[in-house]
Image (cartoon, rainbow, N blue to C red):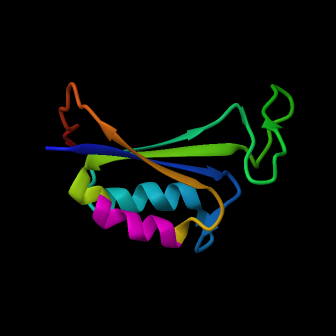
């Protein structure tokens, strides 16, 4: 079974239907039953407009880069990808094959 990691680089200020895009992507991945989804706020980065955004102890920016990582089987990612492309207007989307060394789903109570 082939696994893939879908990685989406967006801005913290990006929105989808009035909610943060990174939240919308994670929620949609969960609704589709994908194995793993994580959103990470970056400490520094730049993108399309080549302005460097950073966070400092006293100066917390509200427009930092966010990296969303979604992992599942190749077939599941292929079905999910068109939705991601529709939602991400500005950003970078990458896809990498993965070798999974251990996977034990977290069971909810």
Q: Residue at x 47, y 59 (%)?
A: 25
Q: Residue at x 39, y 63 (%)?
A: 81
Number of numbered markers: 0
Asked which quadrant contains residue 26, the reply is bottom left
Is residue 36 visible in this depiction of the protein? no
Q: Which quarter of the rendered picture does the C terminus lie within?
A: top left
Q: Residue 36's spot in the image, x, y percent? A: 32, 44
Q: Residue at x 36, y 58 (%)?
A: 29
* Above or below, comparing residue 31 to residue 46 in the picture: below
Asked which quadrant contains residue 88, the reply is bottom right
Front in this rendered view, residue 27 or 5: 5
Residue 99 relative to residue 57: left or right: left
Q: Residue furthest left?
A: 1
Q: Residue 53's spot in the image, x, y percent? A: 80, 40
Whether 40 is among the magenta residues is: no
Does the magenta stretch mainly form a helix, a strand or a loop?
A: helix
Residue 84 relative to residue 3: left or right: right
Q: Which quarter of the rendered picture does the N terminus lie within?
A: top left
Is residue 91 visible in this depiction of the protein? yes
Residue 71 relative to residue 51: left or right: left
* Above or below, comparing residue 41 to residue 13 in the picture: above
Q: Residue at x 49, y 67 (%)?
A: 85
* Residues rendered magenta in the picture: 78-86
Q: Residue 93's spot in the image, x, y percent? A: 52, 54
* Above or below, comparing residue 47 to residue 15 in the picture: above
Q: Residue 98's spot in the image, x, y percent? A: 30, 36
Residue 55 relative to residue 82: left or right: right
Front in this rendered view, residue 50 or 104: 50
């Amino acid at each position: 079974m082939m696994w893939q990691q879908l990685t989406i680089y967006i801005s913290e200020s990006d929105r989808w239907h009035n909610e943060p895009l990174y939240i919308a992507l994670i929620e949609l991945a969960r609704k589709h039953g994908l194995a793993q989804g994580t959103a990470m706020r970056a400490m520094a980065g730049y993108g399309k407009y080549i302005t460097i955004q950073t966070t400092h102890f006293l100066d917390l920016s509200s427009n930092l880069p966010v990296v969303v990582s979604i992992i599942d089987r190749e077939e599941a990612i292929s079905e999910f990808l068109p939705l991601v492309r529709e939602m991400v207007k500005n950003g970078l989307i990458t896809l990498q094959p993965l070798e999974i060394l251990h996977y034990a789903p977290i069971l909810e109570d």
